[in-house]
Image: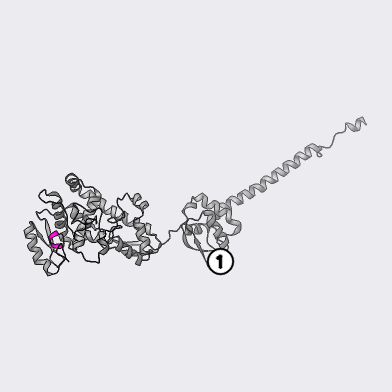
Amino acid sequence: MTRAAGKRLPWWRPRRSRWAQYVALAVVAVTLVVGGVWLSRTYQRVIDYPERPGVGSAEPIAVEVAKGASFPQVLTQLLEAGVIPEDEGLYFKLFVLHRGAAGKITAGAHSFRGDMTPEQVLAELIRAQRTEETRVTIPEGRNILEVADILAVAGYGDASVILAAMRDPALLKEFGIEGESVEGYLYPDTYKFPTEATPEQVVRRMVEQHRKVYDNLKRSHREALEELRKTLGWGDREIIIMASLVEKETAAKHERPLIAGVFLNRLRFSSFQPKRLETDPTIIYGCTAAVKKSAACEKFEGRIRRIHLRDPDNPYNTYTHEGLPPGPITNAGKSAFEAVLAPKKSRFLYFVSRNDKTHQFSKTLAEHEAAVEKYMRQGAVGDGSAAGAADAE
């Protein structure tokens, strides 16, 4: 028993504890080899993934990405449409996230195929969408009522809805515009608006264009701006109001600097009292486009009469109120602004229509009355003249 107990095992038969260790080592070795092979294949698959063609057909697959859709929502759409195989959803997600492109996906209609590579799928997802646009021309000298009608015809909603946007207090505050509307700040131009744009977006675009043009003019007329500030205490709004008056007074662009000069003379010359601009378009605006209308304006039928000329309750009536009206009366173009910032110097204080879209200018009231007698009796309506317009019945 003692000899048997002390008998050694052959060298090729390890003890049970060592046998277990060898088995464990073998399992670890096999696991490492298998794991290494799997990792190698997985790594290679990840490396090759962006350029690996899909397993689907070459038939077009339309996918509409909604505005504001998240990347997980878009990925679900791609999986359901068969653009990305179900078992590759995670791969594609990691691929897009690695590229930092999850936030670059564009809303709109996209076209895919089942055989596209992930690289091609992602390129289509972030492709800039072609926006359908509508060409709209806003002529110079149109007020907000007329602009709203133009935009309504172009398909941007009912005119009343567009007008509501033009008078929206929140938008006016955002733009920093005084007054009750964006009148005077809708730059007349030819625009290409997105077909799906809202009235607010359209209004914002036009105001931005106004500011772009006006800021450029300010930079090139610094001395004129300073002169208007010193002599009349004017800022941007007063210049915009005056430009609207010049715009409405004449369609002859070569006359605008002289018209602007007459208005400025009336305000600057101490000998001219009272300082009333006496221009008919302001009365018409107060009776048509202003939100609140006087009792006399309620009776306005398209023609200025004595009741309108003498109306003190129309704040836009420059025959009964001195200085500028409370706000712009139209949306002026560039030439009207240039006329205000670079007026033609003269001693003229009056003008009246010649009935050919130009005006006769006068320095004295006597000269003006003679011109009124000559031209107004031929059928013209008063224009820039209290004496002339007062005769219109």
- Left or right: where 46 falls relative to 277: right
Residue identified by numbered label 1: 57
Residue 337 on image: x %, y %:
21, 55
Residue 101 visible at all: no
Residue 18 visible at all: yes
* Residue 364 picture quarter: bottom left
Residue 211 on image: x %, y %:
29, 52
Q: Which of 219 and 295 is in front in this view?
A: 295
Indicate whether residue 125 is drawn in magenta. no
Taking the spot 46% from the left edge, 61% from the top edge, the residue there is 108
Amino acid carrying label 1: it is Ser
Q: Nearer the viewer, residue 18 or 35?
A: 35
Taking the spot 14% from the left edge, 49% from the top edge, the residue there is 268
Pick out the residue farthest to the bottom: 378
The N terminus, quarter of image: top right
Q: Which of 285 and 89 is in front in this view?
A: 285
Pick out the residue farthest to the right: 1
* Residue 15 picture quarter: top right
Question: Above or below — where is 9 with respect to 345?
Answer: above
Residue 323 on image: x %, y %:
19, 51
Few, some or many residues within 10 Å of mark 1 (<14, 14–19, 20+):
few
Q: What stretch is highlighted in magenta?
A: 380-389
